């Protein structure tokens, strides 16, 4: 299969996949949602899955160092990413998730449980189930390297540390979270270090990914650059 036509298999069909990887604050979520809207494809935000597991464990006093107990939670959750009025909502067992999922506390806890190899293997199968017709835009940290290594288009976003921190601060403040900048800075750097250095599926770009620096780019500029790149690739069922 050529690089241009590479994708993922699902029930005997070839399903086109686009992966968006990178650390927090680079614009992965915004880009993946925009592409999903433009193409009319399904969305996977893999970070939300780890956040949901971390949140459930915290709420139910489950030891987040106990990998087996965390794995036992997976069959109990059903996550859906739904497009509603030009925005995406995330449902957990048919109910919209609480905004507290997006706090840095949950984000750091999600990063900590993401180091467990058996948990990652179980979630690998879970994440691949989102690959359904007509296509998938997958947002995460190892989408192009581990989860969908044959994705037709792979994007790796990055940005300066200072810009990422400011974006994350703005994002949290928009959702009415009171955040201390120095505390946020420490949490982001701790999570970055853990994600970049973990032995299982570290945060690294795929060798065939488009590297895109979003530091000085607006959301529209990032989207347009990716769409321009995609036009150079033979994408079936693409609506751009």
Image: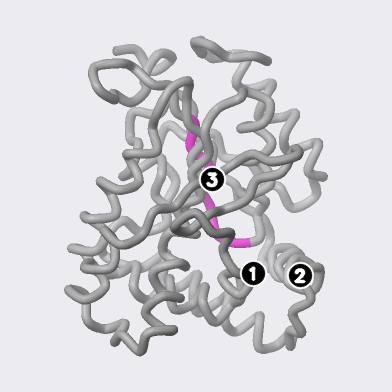
Task: Measure the C-alpha gap from mark 2 to mark 1.
Answer: 8 Å
Label 3 SS: strand
Residue at the far front: name it.
94
Q: CA distance from mark 2 to mark 3?
A: 19 Å
Residues in magenta, as a range:
18-24
Badge 3: few (under 14), some or many (20 or more) residues near its Cα, within 10 Å? some
User: Which quadrant would residue 199 be assigned to in this image?
Assistant: bottom left
Q: Which residue does the numbered mark 2 point to in the structure image?
A: 175
**Marks 2 & 3, CB-CB < 8 Å contact:** no
In terms of secondary structure, where does tag 1 sit? helix
- Could you tell me which residue is drawn at 53 percent across and 52 percent down? 22
Neighbours of disc 2 within 10 Å: few (<14), some (14-19), many (20+): few
Tell whether position 144 is magenta.
Answer: no
Quick check: is 21 in the magenta stretch?
A: yes
222 vs 84, nearest the viewer? 84
Relative height, residue 34 to residue 95 (above, below): above
* Mark with earlier residue (2, 3): 3
The residue at the point 21 percent across, 76 percent down is 69
Which is more toward the observer, 121 or 181?
Answer: 121
Label 1 environment density (alpha carbons within 10 Å; few <14, some 14–19, many ≥20): few
Q: Is residue 179 above or below residue 131?
A: below
Tell me what residue is drawn at x 72 percent, y 34 percent. 223
x and y, in percent, of residue 168 in the image: 70, 67
Residue topped by disc 1: 99
Whether residue 210 sits left or right of residue 206 in the image: it is right
Between 25 and 125, the residue placed more toward the observer is 125
Across and down, in percent, residue 2 comes to 34, 12
In the drawing, what numbered circle is on residue 81? 3
Looking at the image, do the residues carrying marks 2 and 1 touch, with CB atoms under 8 Å apart?
yes
């Amino acid at each position: 299969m050529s690089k241009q036509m590479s994708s993922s298999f699902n029930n005997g069909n070839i399903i086109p996949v686009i992966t968006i990887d990178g650390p927090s604050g680079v614009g992965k979520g915004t880009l993946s949602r925009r592409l999903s809207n433009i193409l009319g494809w399904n969305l996977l935000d893999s970070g939300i899955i780890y956040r949901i597991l971390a949140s459930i464990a915290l709420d139910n006093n489950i030891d987040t160092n106990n990998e087996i107990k965390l794995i036992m939670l997976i069959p109990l959750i059903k996550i859906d990413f739904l497009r509603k009025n030009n925005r995406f909502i995330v449902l957990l067992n048919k109910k919209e998730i609480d905004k507290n999922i997006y706090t840095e506390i949950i984000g750091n806890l999600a990063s900590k449980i993401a180091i467990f190899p058996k948990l990652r293997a179980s979630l690998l199968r879970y994440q691949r189930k989102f690959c359904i017709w007509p296509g998938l835009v997958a947002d995460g940290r190892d989408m192009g390297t581990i989860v969908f290594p044959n994705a037709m288009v792979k994007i790796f976003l990055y940005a300066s540390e200072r810009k990422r921190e400011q974006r994350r601060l703005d994002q949290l403040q928009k959702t009415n979270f009171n955040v201390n900048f120095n505390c946020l800075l420490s949490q982001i750097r701790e999570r970055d270090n853990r994600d970049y250095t973990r032995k299982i599926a570290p945060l690294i770009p795929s060798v065939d990914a488009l590297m895109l620096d979003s530091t000085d780019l607006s959301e529209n500029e990032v989207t347009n650059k990716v769409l321009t790149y995609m036009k150079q690739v033979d994408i079936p069922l693409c609506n751009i």
